[in-house]
Amino acid sequence: MAAGNKHSLLVVGSIAFDSIETPNGSVADALGGSATYFSYAASFFLPPRLVAPVGEDFPDEHRQLLIGRGVDASGLVTLPGQTFRWKGRYHHDMNTRDTLEVHLNVLGSFKPDLPERFRDSTHVFLANSGPVLQARVLDQVQHPELVLADTMDLWIESERPALLKLLKRVDGLLLNDSEAQLLTGDDNLVRAGKAVRRLGPKFVILKKGEHGAMLFMQDDVYVMPAYPTEEVIDPTGAGDSFAGGILGFLASDAGAAPGSLRQAMAYGAVIASMTVEGFGLERLKRTERSEIDDRLKKYRAMLSF
Amino acid sequence: MAAGNKHSLLVVGSIAFDSIETPNGSVADALGGSATYFSYAASFFLPPRLVAPVGEDFPDEHRQLLIGRGVDASGLVTLPGQTFRWKGRYHHDMNTRDTLEVHLNVLGSFKPDLPERFRDSTHVFLANSGPVLQARVLDQVQHPELVLADTMDLWIESERPALLKLLKRVDGLLLNDSEAQLLTGDDNLVRAGKAVRRLGPKFVILKKGEHGAMLFMQDDVYVMPAYPTEEVIDPTGAGDSFAGGILGFLASDAGAAPGSLRQAMAYGAVIASMTVEGFGLERLKRTERSEIDDRLKKYRAMLSF
């Protein structure tokens, strides 16, 4: 980034080869993973810093794709072995999926160490991983201004104490509806979201897939529908693209205005709606900032009355 | 209504005794039915005209409740026999329910004949019933300006030709997500909604329960989330309250402005969010127009960014 810009955005997460089956077709070994989708989405706003492990099988072509988007890939660590692999199948309604295979490979033993020059990052996304690892990343960031963490049912069930400890240290938590219900034991999403916020985070973003998202901040609740699209080809990466749009916008100069979190979520929703319109990164590769801004404008008009 | 007001709103539907079980409790023989919820919701905007059959067991207290709201109940016909009865049980998530008992009673043989003075109605809600009956009502309205019809899976499956014929005659169709999928054979809600609109109606409102609604008008798609509430006590009547808020607002003087359909839907969403906060009409009975307007204001703020 240009010297003088006071914000910088760090993501620590996964890079994967995804094999995906949907009612519309399938794809094998597509570039995916939380850090990939997040940083690609964020790159429409500013060049993000990426930390993630890959195996010796990771092609230079993928690295160049990210670098071509302005991603600072100096935290892309090549470890002995294979890159993380995931295989899944979406059901007919595209809202639910079965995981067919998971091979953690290099991700299994990865202990993130931030490059020295990443330690002054102002905005941080702790993509889904164990809360102990997420805390370890946080320990290495000197003066974070805004930390957003993602989590999943696995950690809620198996590492609840560590997760609760982490929640006292982050500004925002991102989780989906069933995870909020699991974490709080409350089926009503409004009550569940408020209860998660009382566990520590200043704000909670509750994802509802094709039904949009809710934001809990102080005692207020906001709801946002998903941007409606006719072409749901592959939902993989929607959540991480959403997060990338949110933090990308917030870390950009425009996002520093007060009350911009909802505009950031709108950008996230718009980018996520594009992600699902193709397999893997296919659709995001075909877009540019102006198309995102056009869709944001339509989204805003759609919600005003 | 005062002479000189050019709009009048007619609903033809059902009046029921509902017995409802939810995880939060239960209620027996509560006043319900599509025409009841619709007209109660619409009465916050203007005094609606109601046509529906009841049995000899229908207490005067219920009739007085509606008349007290300004409802013109001269189309409330008492027939020999019992009032329509429905019994249902909501599942834990409050989004799905099982019908335990249906006794059509007087509803089974009801053939709606509009009182002479209702035939000049400008706005018409054809609540859920067979499309042949709905067409029969429409035949009796002289110069309707806006006709909205509701339907359900039963008619889509058993009376499709009559339903398709009706769709050429109405301005708007209200149906839920699974019904749109059933009617069009398309799982994607954006494509399904557009396909329903091509069957005839100028606009289609697709209900998604706690996830809100979508509006299809010309080639445009609008999405609206449900107003989030912590107190989902009983979802019965939410859809008909939604419709009552929509047509009530549109038939009121304020609703005559161009582009007011979305504001009408916002009113509908707000009233529906109140309906679900109590059993039967319990919560609506405790509200007044100023509280509805306050919630509308919050809803609008919630959706702007």
Image (spheres, coloured by chain):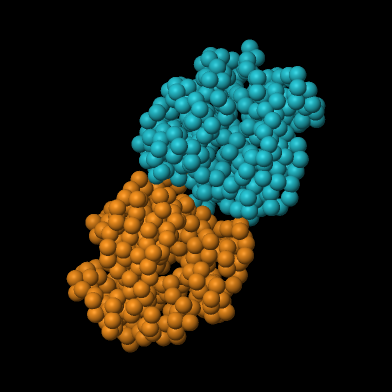
Chain colours: A cyan, B orange
Q: In this view, does A169 lie above or below B183?
A: above
Q: Quadrant of residue A100?
A: top right
- Residue B303 x/y as whole percent: 45, 47
Q: Which residue in the rendered view is the most extreme toward the front?
A: B100
- Residue A178 x/y as whole percent: 48, 41
Q: Which residue is drawn at 55% across and 22% down?
A: A134
Q: Is residue A133 above or below residue A182?
A: above
Q: Which residue is drawn at 35% across and 65% down?
A: B87
Q: In this view, does A135 lie above or below B281?
A: above
Quadrant where the image shows the N terminus of chain A: top right
Q: Residue at x 53, y 78 (%)?
A: B159
Image-based side of B121 in relation to A34, left or right: left
Q: Is residue A282 above or below residue A23?
A: above
Q: Which residue in the rendered view is the most extreme toward the bottom?
A: B116
A73 vs A122, nearest the viewer:
A73
Q: In which quarter of the image is residue B5?
A: bottom left
- Residue B192 x/y as whole percent: 60, 62
Image-based side of B24 in relation to A111, left or right: left
**How many dots with numbers?**
0
Quadrant where the image shows the C terminus of chain A: bottom left
- Residue B144 x/y as whole percent: 43, 79
Q: Can residue B7 be seen in this view?
A: no
